[in-house]
Image: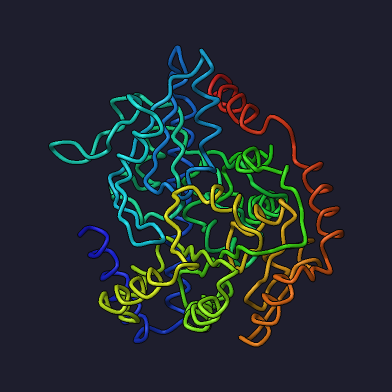
Amino acid sequence: MERTKRRDMENLKIKLKKYIPSKLIKIRKNCLTYTYAINGRWRKSKISRKAINEKISIIFLVYMPQTWNSLKTVYDRAKEYIECETYLVVIPYNTMLGDGTLINSVKYWESLYPGEVISAKGQFGWLDLKQFNPDIIFRQEPYDNTFPQSYSCKRLSSIARLCYISYGMTMDRRHLKTVYSHRFMSDVYAFFCDTHEVKEYLEETKNKHPLIGSYQIYYYGFPRFERINTSYKFNRSNHTFTWIPRWTLDGKNNDASSFFLYCAKLIRYFEANQKLNLIIRPHPMMFSNFIDNKILTKEEVRQLFEKINSVDNICLDSEMDYLITFEKTDVLIADFSSLNMEFALSGKPIIYCGKNIKGCLTEFSDYCYSVRDWEGLKKQIEELSRGCDKYLEERIICSKKHMERIPNNISDNIVKACIEMCRMG
């Protein structure tokens, strides 16, 4: 209900902007940004003077199981330090798996960490995190509209050092402006960068806007990479394809979803080719976004699920952890996604359904397959299923080189930095 109200307010603001001169909007936006930055700088200076607990108190505030891999190894490592007191606070949220099954976030984390999970929703409302006297808070995502107002960046930054590890690997510079907004940067005490591109972007912003850039920057590597399996045995037989359609049709900042371009055609193709398998793993927000925006109805989604379930060699992914699905995947059919680089590191082939393959896959883009239409996608599926993978050797070499550049002890270094950050004040 709270999220719906905020979304309605945002839609109203968009409509009202049509009647206000663009120059006035820009002036107002700049004034608000710098006022917010001044307040953010004051909050951070106040927190840095706060008395430190005997043990460093670290809260991991989460709600989306599908992006837990960004924080998982950091949480696991922090628990091993006697200097740290960790709290896993979970916001109750029903997340949809690819097969339409709703999973409660609290129950999911309780299955992973029995006895460690604290539900953020109590009998009398949202839990006041001040009761834990936190020194550091890791919030899972940068977007305030996906969290209760009680856990906005502004409020969290007033009680602890708000730290951020990217929920997904950020490659495209256009996407950086969406994730790392000026308001978000004004609240965050320290960024632990997932890529050199992010580090450079934050440094540029810090130099260009000193008032906004009152944050610390660390680069130890992306914690997700610590869980990647590189022992995959390559073969020329590709039978299992996984398709990961994006959640939005908006192509302003990134390539839009290919769902409506290829869904019906892929189902018909694999239905006619029973020796091949198709796993469909849509973005967790895709179907709900299409329903909310009246692009699809609930009945149409139900009928689609029914159709897919009737075909033996096609399934909607029921795994919460995408790494489990990637293990059994031979070829990834991908839209723009932060998961693409993780899959690329396995050395397996990717068919990219968009224009900006370079921005999404960087150096791997030369060894993956880019398609613009159904005929191109169909041809690539047929060739790879026959073992015709012309980039196999180059991709394996590229993967090994990239893995060699990934720093060691990523999570351990992040935890050490958190301890030092607090001790130094």
Quarter holding the C terminus is: top right
Q: Percent from the top left, x then y, of residue 294?
A: 30, 80
Farthest-out residue, left: 124
Identified at 24% across, 65% down, the residue is 4
Q: Percent from the top left, x then y, of residue 62?
A: 39, 42
Q: How many labels does the image show?
A: 0
Q: Percent from the top left, x then y, of residue 14?
A: 35, 78
Nearer the observer, 391 or 186: 391
> Is any atom of residue 15 visible in this view?
yes
Identified at 64% across, 47% down, the residue is 194
Left or right: where 392 falls relative to 299: right
Nearer the observer, 96 or 360: 96
Identified at 26% across, 74% down, the residue is 298
> Is any atom of residue 250 visible in this view?
no
Left or right: where 396 falls relative to 424: right
Q: Which colour scheme is used?
A: rainbow
Left or right: where 119 falls relative to 163: left
Left or right: where 231 falls relative to 163: right
* Rendering quarter of residue 412: top right
User: Is residue 281 shown above or below 44?
Assistant: below
Q: Percent from the top left, x then y, of residue 127?
A: 24, 35
Nearer the observer, 295 or 35: 295
Farthest-out residue, front: 275
User: Is residue 344 shown above or below 387?
Assistant: above
* Rendering quarter of residue 102: bottom left
Quarter holding the N terminus is: bottom left
User: Is residue 272 shown above or below 103?
Assistant: below
* Rendering quarter of residue 255: bottom right
Nearer the observer, 345 or 47: 345
